[in-house]
Image (cartoon, grey):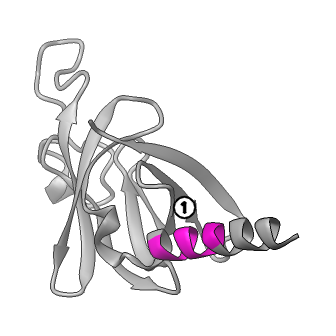
Amino acid sequence: MKHLTFILLFTAISFAGIAQNKDAILGKWINSSAEAHVDITKKGEKYFGKIVWLKDPRDEKGNVKTDIKNPDERLRKQPILGLEILKNFVFEDGKWTDGKIYDPKSGKTYSCNMTMKGKDILNMRGYVGISLIGRSETWKRVK
């Protein structure tokens, strides 16, 4: 019984240590479709992420892919590569919350929360309104 208690306590402490490292999210991540790498950085106390690699940076005509679905017409010519898609996340209670994620495929922006599972798995939850109504993705750290 003492052995089991020790294991449970050690496991809880290990997970708490991972969850409490607010900068653990920093670095490059590959999205679930393996089409893009996003570099997550910190500005002040907030976290942001921009696309730094695309599997296919050019369209079928050989042109650089641009943000053609952006609802703001003035931004439709900006390249997808280098586009900031994660904005204003804050670390709170072991997760990154209150941020926004932009989907260049649809031109839509969603509220988003992020949590880490271990040091190399990032769970994303994008939603409109409440978190229960949304979509989840799992990103992996780029090695």
**Which SS class for mark 1?**
strand
Q: Which of 25 and 135 is in front in this view?
A: 25
Mark 1 lies on residue: 126
The residue most toward the top is 61
As rendered, which of 89 and 26 lies closer to the eye? Answer: 26
Q: Does the magenta stretch include residue 15?
A: yes
Q: Where is residue 11 in the image (x, y as percent from the top left)?
A: 63, 66
Q: Which of 64 and 133 is in front in this view?
A: 133
**Is most of the magenta stretch helix, strand or loop?**
helix
The quarter of the displayed image where residue 5 is located: bottom right
Residue 112 lies left or right of residue 55; in this view the side is: right
In the rendered view of the protein, which quadrant contains the N terminus? Answer: bottom right
Coordinates of residue 110 in the picture (x, y in percent): 48, 65
Tell me if residue 76 comes above or below residue 25 in the rendering: above
Question: Which amino acid type is shown beneath numbered disc 1?
Answer: Gly
81 lies above or below 15: above
Q: Quadrant of residue 9?
A: bottom right
Residue at position x 25%, y 62% in the image: 26
Whether the magenta-drawn stretch holds residue 29 is answered as no
Residue positioned most to the right: 1
Q: Where is residue 47 in the image (x, y as percent from the top left)?
A: 27, 73
Q: What's the magenta region?
A: 10-17
**Residue at point 11% right, 22% down?**
63
21 over 72 or under it: above or below? below
Residue 93, percent across and down? 52, 86
Left of 66 or right of it: where is 30? right
- Quadrant of the image for the C terminus? top left
Quick check: can you spot residue 126?
yes
Q: Residues within 10 Å of mark 1 (few under 14, many from 20)?
A: many
Instruction: Please give left or right for residue 14 compared with residue 40 in the image.
Output: right
Say left or right for 98 vs 65.
Answer: right
